[in-house]
Amino acid sequence: MTSPLCIYRYRDYLEQVKVIETGAIVVGKSISIDGFAEKPVRVITHAHSDHVIGLNESIKYSKYIVATPITLDLAELLGYVDKDLLPLYRLKSTPLDYHKVLRINGDELVLLNADHIPGSTQVLVELAEPKIRVGYTGDFKLTNKTDIIESPDVLVIESTYGNPLYTRPFKDSVPQILVDIVLEGLIKYKRVYIYAYHGKMQEAMKILREGGISEPFILPDKVYRAVRVLEEKYGFNYGSYFKDNDVKYNERSRFIVFKHFNLAKTRRLNGMGLHIVLTGRYTREPYIKVDDYTYVVSLSDHADFNDLVGYVERSNPQLVIIDGFRPGEAGALKEALSKKGFCTTVLPGGI
């Protein structure tokens, strides 16, 4: 376990970096990330619900809403901004591309690639006074696209799969497994239903196109609008796709229908299609056959335990703060990192 002396040594850092009860990662005097705090700058790392917490309050209070251009668009398209606040949100939106520097009251803020969902980012803040480098991973996957925040004074990291049991030795084979199962469904039933959250839908769409599947995607309205923006404004290519309400189903046509993850429990097991539920939860196998018409496929957009530890080792921070607000295994990750000699604490709570 981390010694009290270790934490005491970095007490000055803990005065500048906090994870508070609203879910915000607060850095210095000016910056709040992924949650509301009374700060002039609100940063959004990506457009998932547990990282846009308090966004409407931030729109009212903060002077700048900072994110990648994609995330700013997705937050609006996916309904995270109250309609009556849209004009103010658009006025305060401050798009920042990867590796560009935004200077705020002498501090420097940089967004880095997290390879999680489209537009997702890590955050690096260099405080002017006291002079401290603070990194925050947000949610990330550890791939060859992921930027590593090197040698920060403080690293704030997620812990979704922070338990040593949560490793995915099969993760590189999952894309091809998904392609194979979808092909099986198209051949046998002509239609495949895929249930997933936003972000994971787009990842699955990309995997299927890269796997040679050309059948059209049928999308929910919000996802359809988001995909259109990703294609038309940002150059993504998802092939043929349609909005659900605009399609008249033909018994002879083959297609893939995407639905929100929560609708999987009401799926119809009538032999008229194959159902695939995409989960980010830890499973021992890459896929599970639930019944004659349903597979659960383990497609995660998070780092597993080995990736979390590997990132910290490559980053080599002076102090590690584990985000204990969002769901995860903060205590287990703290213990593992402490055994490797890293000064580690969990906030909020200080486990």
Image (cartoon, helix red, strand yellow):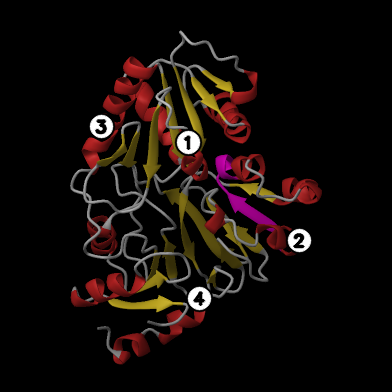
Left or right of 37 on screen, residue 180: left
Mark 1, mark 2: which one is toward the viewer? 1
Query: Which of the labelled discs sits on residue 60, or is there none?
Result: 2
Q: Which residues are magenta?
A: 62-71
Which mark sits nearer the N-terminus, 1 or 3? 3
Structural crowding at the residue carrying mark 2, measured as other residues with C-alpha within 10 Å and reported as few (<14), some (14–19) or many (≥20): few
Query: Nearer the N terminus, badge 2 or badge 3?
Result: 2
The image's mark for residue 238 is none
Between 255 and 91, the residue placed more toward the observer is: 255
User: Circle 3 is placed at which residue position?
Assistant: 177
Q: Are marks 3 and 4 in contact (CB under 8 Å)?
A: no
Q: In the image, is residue 31 above or below residue 183?
A: below
Amino acid type, callout 3: Ile
Per the model, the C-alpha gap separating discs 1 and 3 is: 22 Å
Residue 195: quadrant of the picture: top left
User: Which label sits on residue 18?
Assistant: 4
Measured in 3D between alpha carbons, the distance from the residue under mark 2 to the one under mark 4, in whole angstroms, is 22 Å
Could you say whether the residue bearing mark 1 is in a helix, strand or loop?
Answer: loop
- Residue 184 in the image: state x and y as whole percent: 29, 22
